[in-house]
Image (cartoon, grey):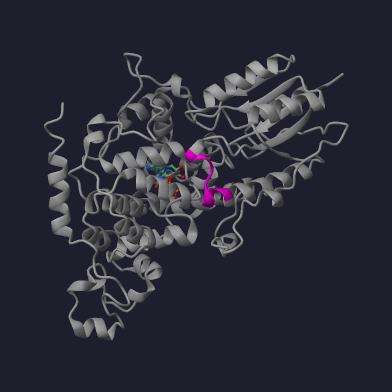
Amino acid sequence: MADISVYWFRDDLRLTDLPGLVAAASAGSVVPVFVRDSGLGGEWRIASASQWWLHHSLVALQHGFAEQGLELILRSGDTVEVLSALAREVGATNVYCSRHYQPWSASLEQTLRDTLSQTGVTLQRYPGTLLHEPEDVATGGGTPFKVFTPFWRACNRRPEPATPLAAPSLKAPAARVASEELSDWQLTPSTPNWAYGWNDLWRPGEAGAQAALNGFLDHHVPHYGDGRDIPSQPNTSKLSPYLRFGNISPRQVWHAAQSAKIEQPSSADSLDKFLSEIGWREFCYHLLHHFPTMPDEAFNPKFNFFPWGDDQERLSAWQRGQTGYPIVDAGMRELWQTGFMHNRVRMVVASFLTKHLLLHWRAGEAWFWDCLLDADLASNACSWQWVGGSGADASPYFRIFNPIAQGEKFDKAGGYTRRWVPELAGVPDKYLHKPWEAPDTVLSESGVTLGETYPLPIVDHKTAREAALSAYATLKSID
Ligand SMILES: Cc1cc2nc3c(=O)[nH]c(=O)nc-3n(C[C@H](O)[C@H](O)[C@H](O)COP(=O)(O)OP(=O)(O)OC[C@H]3O[C@@H](n4cnc5c(N)ncnc54)[C@H](O)[C@@H]3O)c2cc1C
């Protein structure tokens, strides 16, 4: 008699290139399940914007299974209890899954393995959504990498990632298995529906991921190398939420990029740059695996003594995009309205929070966690610590982005800023990133009254910069 297996979906919401699903399918019939465990992850459980992505990824997965006559089973509760009860209920001999790298995942997987084994069920865990498992990449001394460039070099010396797998053909179990209704989970907002319009911007799920990848490789790759820092232009892949939820695997991306190098040799450098950004994602996971306190504690312990401020009004102005610095406000409003922010602008707003406002990187990390569709424990924590100066291979704290110069350099023609800060749309380029320097006549012709239609800067750039450098100087005496 053929076996029945349970496939436990986690951050791998797709049907292609899923080694555990292929193995489960080859062993017999499969009961695919997603468990909503609201106790898992504590403050890092899936937050608002990501829940929207999760909902739509599950819908896409439901459709994918329905095409093969299977149903994606939805169950809520403690992961170990739900999975062991389901395995008993359907008579499964194996539970398959992909590995997770969150700080709580290894102990969860061990508890599950032990509990299942008491009833003769085996947990079959497969590699997760990375190109290289964190333990497979180490320095010559066998220690984890803390610097990106040698890490990525070491990754590239390893055998190339295996060819992506096709979706397996699946067999449903003979008896129907009960499932909860996705709509009862209320993962999408209703009153108010702050995700209004997101269906036009995003297409969560595997088909959307492939479309985003192909669109990027077909149209935008040649401009990636030079243009990835220009937020008004669609030069980057926008693959991050798809990768976050495993709607696509990094090795699918890696292999597609290798093929594109052959088809478009003139874009080889751009493609290598793109792959090195996928490498940053790998690096963040490498760090999270080896340093699991990274989301909560400064990687460089000196920063535990940094004199962070606690001004909630400043935090609120930053969150609402009302700082009076146009490029910062544009980024924060893009985030709120679309669940996404361009990488260059993420760096600018993060620098502004931690250096101009002297607010703790954790406050920014938490806000991003709630608002980003791609909110990812490893990449978010690693990036916030990188900008804040406390991370591994971090940008030095004294590198303080000047929000005026950043706006003038990366949004020279103002397309990005005018889109997200429409009250400044009429301000000429010369003053767009520093409207407080515009003569009164220019402001009135542009329909701007500073302090009324658009805020005055909440801090003065020069003064804030000096305050940040003095705060940083207090760390110098700490060994
Ligand atoms: C303060 C801050 C917070 C961030 N938080 C997150 C987060 O929660 N989730 C997240 O996925 N990215 C995060 N990033 C990294 C980066 O901004 C996004 O991955 C990128 O903007 C996604 O856009 P894209 O897919 O068009 O990127 P592309 O430029 O097309 O890059 C391709 C892929 O590489 C990965 N990548 C690119 N840049 C980075 C990076 N610096 N670090 C890690 N991976 C990277 C992403 O998976 C991305 O989809 C953060 C950056 C900063 C400065």
Q: Position of residue 144 (x, y in %)?
A: 36, 21
Question: What range is drawn magenta here?
Answer: 43-51
Ligand 1 - quadrant of the structure image: top left
In this view, 87 is above or below 255: above
Q: Position of residue 14 (x, y in %)?
A: 64, 40
- In the picture, measured across the screen, residue 49 lies left or right of residue 69, that is left
Task: Answer with left or right where residue 50 lies relative to residue 74.
Answer: left
Is residue 90 highlighted in magenta? no
Residue 292 in view here: yes
Q: Residue at x 41, y 21 (%)?
A: 137
- Against 304, residue 339 (above or below) is below
Question: What count of labels does the image hold?
Answer: 0
Closer to the camera in the image, 143 or 150 = 143
Give how far across and how far down residue 396 sits, in percent.
Answer: 21, 40
Q: Percent position (x, y) of residue 167?
A: 69, 35
Q: Quadrant of the C terminus?
A: top left
Q: Could you tell me what secondary structure mostly forms the magenta stretch?
A: helix
Describe residue 467's horizontal placement relative to residue 196 as left or right: left
